[in-house]
Amino acid sequence: MKTLSLVLMALLYIVAGINHFRDPNFYLRLMPDFLPAHLALIYWSGLAEIVLGVLLVPPSTRSYAAWTIIAMLCVFMLIHVPMALYPEHFPGFSPLLLWIRIPIQGVLILWALTHTRRL
């Protein structure tokens, strides 16, 4: 079961990262005004997700990747919390969906935490 969880997590981050390059305009709509260089941040975060997804696979880098994913998810809260607090700045996104993303981040953090140790 843990191997399946690991494979799914790795694929989730690799696909999510690829999507940053495939559709950067989607992510541009999510970027809060207080962050600089929106497009660069989208590409860098996409690259980070791809690399971290790949690094989850080898046992020698898995713990590092999982802890870095946890840190990255915490940083992403800088985007999710303002979106939930100020949904009027993000038309086209359901306010409920914006709030639901916050506990989802918590679930993703807990999921990554399960992979901070070897199988």
Image (tube, rainbow, N blue to C red):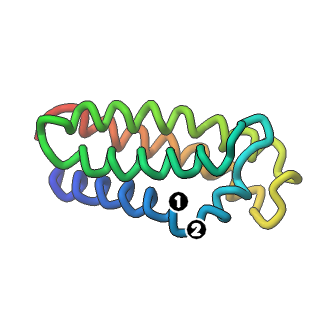
Q: Residue furthest right?
A: 88
Quick check: marks 2 and 1 in contact, CB under 8 Å?
A: yes
Residue receiving disc 2: 23
Residue type, mark 1 in image: His
Residue visible at 39% across and 38% down in the picture: 69
Question: 68 above or below 45?
Answer: above
Q: Residues within 10 Å of mark 2 (few under 14, many from 20)?
A: few
Query: Which quadrant of the view contains residue 80?
Result: top right
Count how many numbered circles sit on residues in the image: 2
Q: Secondary structure at mark 2?
A: loop
Q: Quadrant of the C terminus?
A: top left
Mark 2–mark 1 Cα distance, whole angstroms, equals: 6 Å
Residue visible at 64% across and 57% down in the picture: 27
Residue visible at 60% across and 46% down in the picture: 40
Residue type, mark 2 in image: Asp
Residue receiving disc 1: 20
In this picture, residue 2 sits left or right of residue 110: left
**In the image, residue 19 lies at what x, y percent?**
49, 64
Pick the front one: 112 or 54: 54
In this picture, residue 70 sits left or right of residue 28: left
Q: Quadrant of the N terminus?
A: bottom left
Q: Secondary structure at mark 1?
A: helix
